[in-house]
Amino acid sequence: MIIKKAWRILTVGDGDLSFSHSLLTNHQPRHLTATVFDTLETMSNKYSENAYQALHKKGIPLLFNFDVTNKESWSTLAKQTFDVVIFQFPLLPGFASFEEFNKTAAQASINTLNRALLRTFLFNAFEHFLDPLGEQLCFITSKDVKPYREWNIENALHQQSHFNYLGSSLFNIDDFPDYKVRNVDRDKHVRDTQGRTYVWSTQATHPFQTLLDKAVYQDKQCCTACRAGPFTTDLDRAEHNASKKHRQMQEFEAQWQAYLTEHQ
């Protein structure tokens, strides 16, 4: 992840605030506002170690009960005042019961719902949080393993939208000392699997783009959704297309297209 000191940054859904604290301490952005999905009481009970007091003492604006999909929860946030909005390792919260899971899954697959969360984040960030005269950058950091890789982040989220995918960079957790990647629902650290930070902007071309890696597996000899290839023969492609992985990704993509059609 590439951070510049001149930026005004908003962090979204920072579970225990350790990312925001490390960002402030080690990268010193011009301004930082940090948000948490839980209430302060819930966060404090869930994560016995958190950075609330450290950030509060430094006068950092902190918003709790912040649901990026619900305008009512962030209506007090100053509108269009940020250069960059960052969402670290987003994931739908766990379900309280099997009945809740069945009710939610009846609407769409969990894969589609996670994609929809990220897409809604991007739309709201560009419309409500980012200064139209500022950098206009959105960051999502995600793990490069299943099920996160199956969200097809590089290609799916900006379809039928006004924003553009610029590229990605490796997320090196060593650049953020004391940042703990947390489980969404309990006081447990998540294994430090390799992650990437994906970047979008309303600008089709952006100076920041030169610092990023381009999207991979975009050649016609590749399978973009599966991130496979290039295939050197028709047999190679046919074998891939017949694989369980490809058939599963095709189903995910079909579900996503149906979601976009329903919500356009």
Image: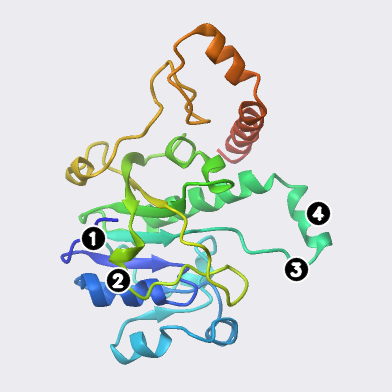
Amino acid type at circle 2 is: Leu
Q: Is residue 160 left or right of residue 209?
A: right
Name the secondary structure under disc 1.
Answer: loop
Q: Earlier in the sequence, mark 4 or mark 3?
A: 3
Decide: few, some or many residues near mark 3? Use Cα within 10 Å; few <14, some 14-19, many ≥20: few
Q: Which residue is mark 1?
A: 3
Q: Secondary structure at mark 3?
A: loop
Residue tagged 3: 96
Marks 3 and 1: in contact by CB < 8 Å?
no
Tell me if I can see residue 152 in this picture.
yes
Q: How is the image coloured?
A: rainbow
**Of the residues tagged 4 and 2, which is closer to the observer?**
2
10 Å neighbourhood of mark 1: few (<14), some, or many (≥20)? few
Q: Which residue is mark 4?
A: 102
Instruction: Name the spot of residue 220 as percent of width and height, x first.
Output: 42, 16
In terms of sequence position, does the residue under pointer 3 or pointer 2 come before the other?
A: 2
Kind of residue at badge 4: Asn
Q: Residue at x 67, y 64 (%)?
A: 94
Q: Is residue 81 visible?
A: no
Q: Amino acid at mark 1?
A: Ile
